[in-house]
Every structure is written in C-alpha cells, then in structure tokens.
Image (cartoon, rainbow, N blue to C red):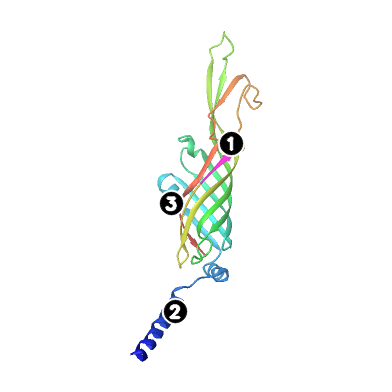
Amino acid sequence: MKRIIIPLLFTIVSYSQNDVQNVRVIKDDSQVTELVNTLGKNEIKLDVIDLLFQPALSISYERISDSYSSFGGDVFINFNNVNSSVSWTDSFSISPFYRFYFLNKKDFGGAGFFVELFSKFSFGQETVEYAYGIYDELTEPYFEFVDENYFDIGLGVGIGRKWINKKGITFEIMFGIGRYLLDEVGGVDDQSMPFGVDDVFRNHRPEVTVKGGISIGKRF
C-alpha cells in the first residue's frame, strides 16, 4: 500500500508545483517596456463628452516616455456661445501636461491610474460694461456693453484612469482642477477705457479652471 501511496503523493505535489509555476506569470519592467514599444509610444484621443454635449472639439496628443510617465497636450475649440455659461468661457485653449502612471505589472505601460500636472493657455471673450455720466448730476447715465478678447494662463493638477487593449485602443476618464493666474479687473484707473467712460464693470471670468472628460483614443 505504501508503494502505491508515496509515488501518488509525489505525483500530486509535482503537478501542483508545475501548475502554480504556469499560473504565476509576473512581468518585469523590461517586459512592460517591450509591450510599450510593441504598441507604440504615440497616442491620439478624442473627448466624447465635449463632442456630444457641447458644440466643442477637444483633441489630445500623448507621448509615452516610459512605462510610468508621459507628456502631451490638449487642444480645445469651443463652437458654442462663449457667454452662455461661466464654465465654458474659453473659445480656444492649449493645455500641455505631464503624467505619472501607477500601473499593474500586467498592464501595457502608460496606462492605469495616473496623476497629471497641467498648464492652460486660454483665449476667449468677456462682456465689458462701460458706464457714462454716472458722476454727472446733469447728465442721464447710460451704459454700453462690449465683447472684448482676453488671454489667461492657468496651472492645475488632475487624476484619472486609462485602459488599453492589445490592439492599442484606449479608454480614459480624467478630472482636474486649476487656478487662473491672470485676473484682469477693470476700474476707474483702467487706461484701456474709451474716452468719457466713468467706470467699467466686467463679467469676471472664473478664477478656477476645470479639465476633464471621457476620451477614446488609439496608440500607435
């Protein structure tokens, strides 16, 4: 009986070890880098939220530096009425970014959870209200509304998650928040005021800028 049981036990243990060895496949950094090179290091993405719910277009380019970092930029073009919402006052913006990825070893590199540092260069229009005759008791005051162009710069940070399949198709969710650095406010000392203006009031742009969306892309 022992002659039968002992060989059987050795067979079971040996089979279990082989089975475990076949299941435990862990990629090291060189293997992840190889997968990154296979799929490519360039990526183009389109934000479907802006496309579907805003008459706006947001396209991103990302360059994979290595398995854990990347850099790129976003271009935003707003086809909507820029004064219809304080959240979407930009008519055009460029947003360079740098990302740090925290990924699973089974991933393809340049994917997974990430933290993003971004800057934003915004162009748009704001409505300016010019007041005439408000300090003259003999003159009936009147107001003039003028749309003026503006430029602003913002800095911010964001977080997100990216998935990628073996064909290089990517799906990404991201949200970021930042602050504008230029806050041009008009007043009685505003040298850009037209002649005869007593005061100027601006529909102040938000001090906070928001970046985010749901994107679908292709790595090549």
- Residue 179 highlighted magenta (yes or no): yes
Q: Which residue is mark 3?
A: 48
Residue 89, percent across and down?
51, 38
Q: Which mark is residue 17?
A: 2
Q: Nearer the viewer, mark 3 or mark 2?
A: 2
- Mark toward the start of the polypeptide (1 vs 2): 2
Q: Nearer the viewer, mark 1 or mark 3?
A: 3
Q: How many marks?
A: 3
CA separation in Å, label 3 and label 2: 48 Å
Q: Residue furthest left?
A: 1
Which kind of residue does numbered mark 2 sit on? Gln
Residue 8, percent across and down?
37, 86
Q: Which residue is mark 1?
A: 150
Q: Which residues are magenta?
A: 176-180
Classify 205 as above or below 195. below
* Viewer-closest of 195 and 180: 180
Classify 105 as above or below 120. below
* Badge 3: residue crowd in 10 Å (few <14, some 14–19, many ≥20): some
* Badge 2: residue crowd in 10 Å (few <14, some 14–19, many ≥20): few
Q: Residue furthest top?
A: 138
- Residue 46 highlighted magenta (yes or no): no
